[in-house]
Amino acid sequence: MTLRICEFNLSGQPIGKGRPRFTKSGHTYTPTKTKEYEQRIKRAAWAEMQRQSLKPTGRRVNVIVAGYFEIPKSYSKMKRLECQSGILIPKKPDVDNVIKAVLDACNEIVYDDDSQVWYIAGFKRYCDEGQEPHIHVKIQWDDPTNTPNLVHTNPANA
């Protein structure tokens, strides 16, 4: 089997998936900020899939998401060093909400549906010195279409 990988970065401060909002009549909708962010993720994933000439997979996938956040300018030098060493991590947004935004955005782009995700890993941390805030996404799956035909023979019969 061939391992397929869709890996991309999206610049800018990571954003978590916002809670659904309700109109006065009771209808639900996704907040504009979340919609726009998911569109940016979708475009980055689509561009990488096109670059590699890949089609959305129906196979199980694993997803790794890393969120790199800007260190607040108001932090002291000591606190900034703690951020860069990973001692302090960003409080908001929750890492699961950052992952949810990525999973929903990649539906029908990288995979048919996010129900195919069987493994997820994610973390958030502050950027290193000189690093810009961004998310890094890596999605992998097995592709059986490029598997060579293997003939298994019993050595005793050869």
Image: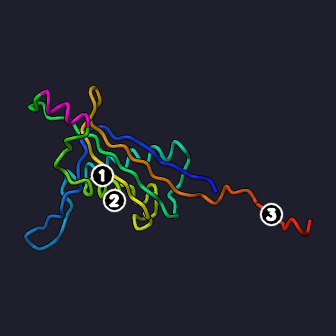
What secondary structure is marked by label 2?
A: helix
Q: Quadrant of residue 119?
A: bottom left
Nearer the observer: mark 2 or 3; the answer is: 3
On the picture, is 66 further left or further right than 83?
Answer: right
The amino acid at mark 3 is: Val
| Cα separation between marks 1 and 3 | 45 Å
The mark that comes first in sequence, 2 or 1, is 1
Residue corresponding to mark 2: 104
| Residue 27 coordinates in the image, percent (x, y) | 16, 71
- Could you say which is closer to the camera, residue 151 or residue 9? 151
Q: Which residues are magenta?
A: 77-85
On the picture, is 50 further left or further right than 86?
Answer: right
The mark that comes first in sequence, 2 or 3, is 2
| Cα separation between marks 2 and 3 | 40 Å
The amino acid at mark 1 is: Glu
Q: Is 78 included in the stretch rendered in magenta?
A: yes
Which residue corresponds to the image point at 45% horizontal and 57% vertical from the top-left? 62
| Residue 116 coordinates in the image, percent (x, y) | 45, 66
Residue corresponding to mark 3: 151
Q: Quadrant of residue 118?
A: bottom left
Q: Is 104 included in the stretch rendered in magenta?
A: no
Q: Is residue 121 above or below residue 158?
A: above
The amino acid at mark 2 is: Asp
Task: Name the dominant secondary structure of the magenta segment.
Answer: helix
Residue corresponding to mark 1: 38
Which residue corresponds to the image point at 11% horizontal and 67% vertical from the top-left? 23
On the picture, is 122 further left or further right than 51?
Answer: left
What secondary structure is marked by label 3?
A: loop
